[in-house]
Image: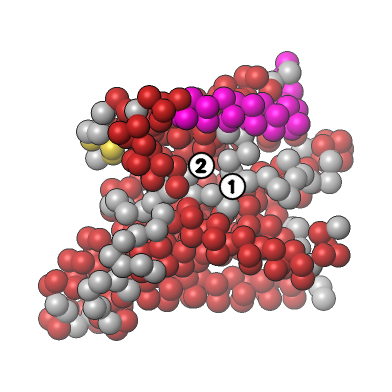
Amino acid sequence: MTFLQKKKQYGILFLIALIALFFLMILSGTLGAADISFSESLRIMVSGVPWLRRFADAGSIRSSSRMILWNVRLPRVFLSALIGAGLSIVGATFQGMFRNPMADPYILGISSGASAGATAAIVLGWGGMVSGMGMTALFAFAGALLTTLLVYRIARVGNRLPTLGLILAGVAVGFFLSSLVNIMMFFHRDQMERIVMWTMGSLATATWGQVRILFPVVLLGSAVLFVFARDLNAMSTGEETAKSLGIEVEKVKKFLLALSSLIIACCVSTAGVIGFIGLIVPHSIRLALGSDQRVVIPFSAAFGAIFLVLCDTLARNLIPPSEIPVGVVTSLFGAPFFVYLLHRNKKKVM
């Protein structure tokens, strides 16, 4: 099969994935304690688009359904799609950059930094809002970025940024920050439940304000990472090979690290630590479609969004009226599927 044939085939498959994501988002909006039909959910979504509003038959939409879907469910659905896409794309980038199929967005200890920041805000009782963002989220964002800077400073050797040094520094800093979180939990046991729930990940407090902040970060960040797909392909064969092809490896690594860290920090500060998705989705795409980053990155975005929307829908509907942390669901359902996929593709993995 020629490259053009493959490109056309991948284009059709990607379009199917986007259509599946769209219908899954509508379906997710219909599920919950309040009964909202699929058609009504679709009409409410269409009514929110100015140039499509006349096709929505807005007069037949119940005001209660509009309020529930538009103010509660849709922000959560859109936020889950954005976070799933963001974490999956960063996972694909790190797996290519580190040449490690086990790399995920949290390999550099960024999740531990976010957890430490969020825990500090919780135990200090700083639960207010600043510019529409909660203090816990802002502290988590700051903790994630500061952790990235610390890992970078530890791993840097002159102007070089050794891949192994980054990973080892990330692991060490991550363990240290996790210990700080445990110490804060030990001395503030009255806040332990809030801290544990945050570290498990949840989208229960999703708002349109969070969607507006995260949307440009994930969209633009994903577009830029896709531009570097060819560089990642070269780097995955070895840094010396990439240098021989004219790629400035150190500059590319530093830029990708900074951009990926920003995406992770925004995602984690918004919804807590949602594990496993940044590992399973890009690796599954690689097993199914090959290791070309020009394919892996966009498909990771689409299927990462699908996977997290599906997991969050299950998280809030499996045991109503209670809710399971979405990070638990991603691991609970993702791990068996991942094991099955590895079993089916043993020769590709070895």
Mark 1 touching mark 2, by CB under 8 A?
A: yes
Q: Is residue 164 above or below residue 106?
A: above
User: In this figure, which residue is indicated by the disc labeled 1?
Assistant: 90
Report whether residue 99 is seen: yes
Closest to the observer, 136 or 222: 136
In the rendered structure, which disc, 1 or 2, sits on the residue that comes first in sequence? 1
Tell me which segment is drawn in magenta.
158-182
In the rendered structure, the answer to whether residue 230 lies left or right of residue 69 reads right
Mark 1 is on which residue type?
Val
Circle 2 crowding by C-alpha within 10 Å: few under 14, some 14–19, many from 20 = many
From the image, which quarter does the C terminus lie in? bottom right
Q: Quadrant of residue 52?
A: bottom left
* Inter-mark Cα distance, 1 to 2: 8 Å
Q: Quadrant of residue 318?
A: bottom left
From the image, which quarter does the N terminus lie in? bottom right
Type of colouring: secondary structure
Q: Is residue 123 above or below residue 329?
A: above
Report whether residue 254 is seen: no
Closest to the observer, 202 or 254: 202
- Residue depicted at 44% across the width and 56% down the height: 326
Residue 241 screen position, x and y as percent:
87, 40
In the rendered structure, the answer to whether residue 38 lies left or right of residue 346 reads left
- Residue depicted at 48% across the width and 53% down the height: 327
Residue 283 screen position, x and y as percent:
69, 57
Closest to the observer, 149 or 274: 274
User: In this figure, which residue is indicated by the disc labeled 2?
Assistant: 264
- Residue depicted at 68% across the width and 50% down the height: 229
In the rendered structure, the answer to whether residue 321 lies left or right of residue 184 reads left
Question: Magenta span has 180?
Answer: yes
